[in-house]
Amino acid sequence: MNAIETIFVTDWQAPVAPATAAHALDALEAGSVLRLPLPFVLQADEQSLLSPTLLSGARKNISYNPANDRVQGADGEAALEAQLRGFLGRYHRSTRTLIEHLFAPYAAQLIDGRTSYRPAEIAGRVPKSWRHDDTRLHVDAFPATPVHGRRLLRVFNNINPHGEPRRWRVGEPFADVAARFAPRAPKPSSLKSALMAATKITKSRRSGYDHYMLQLHDGMKADLAYQAQVPKTPVEFAPGETWIVYSDQVSHAVLSGRYMLEQTFYVPVAALQYPERSPLKVLEAVTGRALV
């Protein structure tokens, strides 16, 4: 498995050759980051959105929810929100079409998540805590939003107008992360899960899977010796490039960059071509128990 796999797709809307799609699906589910020479071209009236002053307060991104057409995180009036709604809605539709063509087995079960625009520079930003420090290697997990084994499929695009790349590091394979950190984790508590849901700390009951994924996320970020010593692959995504990744599987750190778009989709394990590679199945093998 290559940490970064280039897939030659250059059109958001066009069908993908079967051989290209099969290779992309295999590489994605194996834990590669897919790199596509695929720009998302801004329309003339969207050029004014290339500014970090759009952000409201200390927010690091502007989000769009396709389910209710709502924009959050922008510091502006109704006209700006309408402009962002059109811009981010267009990105959502483009990425969904791309995913349905590139990963046809997912199409019928693909669940829309939020669209995000990140115009601010990440380098030099002071995080709220070490848990929020995305310059440290981690796998993604949501403390308040349990996913019960569903995959986190993310489509990124660098729209930086100044030629600046988005700089990442990619860490060790997920199986190695799970073998290292899962045995250290406390076992999940059904009582604690029920209490968190009842008090609205979480949006639903946290499954055993969600518990272990959060333990991996926190364990990786808290272990500074691990951060220093684990092998890493540096990668730069240039303006005009798209990259696709299962961010719950790929250990990654974001070092610098601004003006980036991101779309999240949720994919049920049942839709995967190789479900045995999923974090759910890997963690169940490591822990010896069903986690959803």
Image (tube, rainbow, N blue to C red):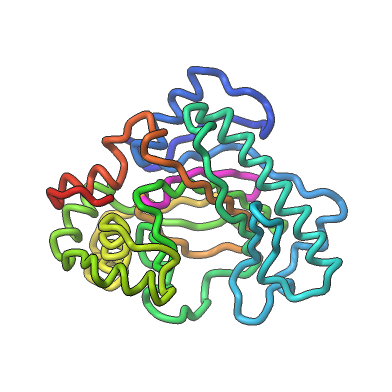
User: Which quarter of the image is occupied by the N terminus?
Assistant: top left
Residue 30 in percent (x, y) is at 34, 36
Say if 280 sits above or below 255 in the image.
above
Magenta residues, start to end: 238-248
Residue 106 in percent (x, y) is at 49, 33
Q: In the rendered image, which quarter is residue 203 located in? A: bottom left
Magenta stretch encompasses residue 240: yes
Magenta stretch encompasses residue 46: no
Q: In percent of the image, x 54 and y 69: which residue is there? A: 122
Q: Is residue 73 left or right of residue 222?
A: right
Front position in the image: 281 or 206 = 206
Say if 129 sits above or below 17 in the image.
below
Give the farthest residue toward the top. 18
Front position in the image: 73 or 162 = 73
Q: In the rendered image, which quarter is residue 187 located in? A: bottom left
Q: Is residue 255 left or right of residue 66?
A: left
Q: In percent of the image, x 64 and y 31: which residue is there? A: 10
Q: Is residue 254 left or right of residue 237?
A: left
Q: Is residue 259 left or right of residue 251?
A: right
Residue 148 in percent (x, y) is at 36, 52
Residue 70 in percent (x, y) is at 70, 61
Q: In percent of the image, x 74 and y 76: which residue is there? A: 75
Say if 146 sits above or below 36 in the image.
below
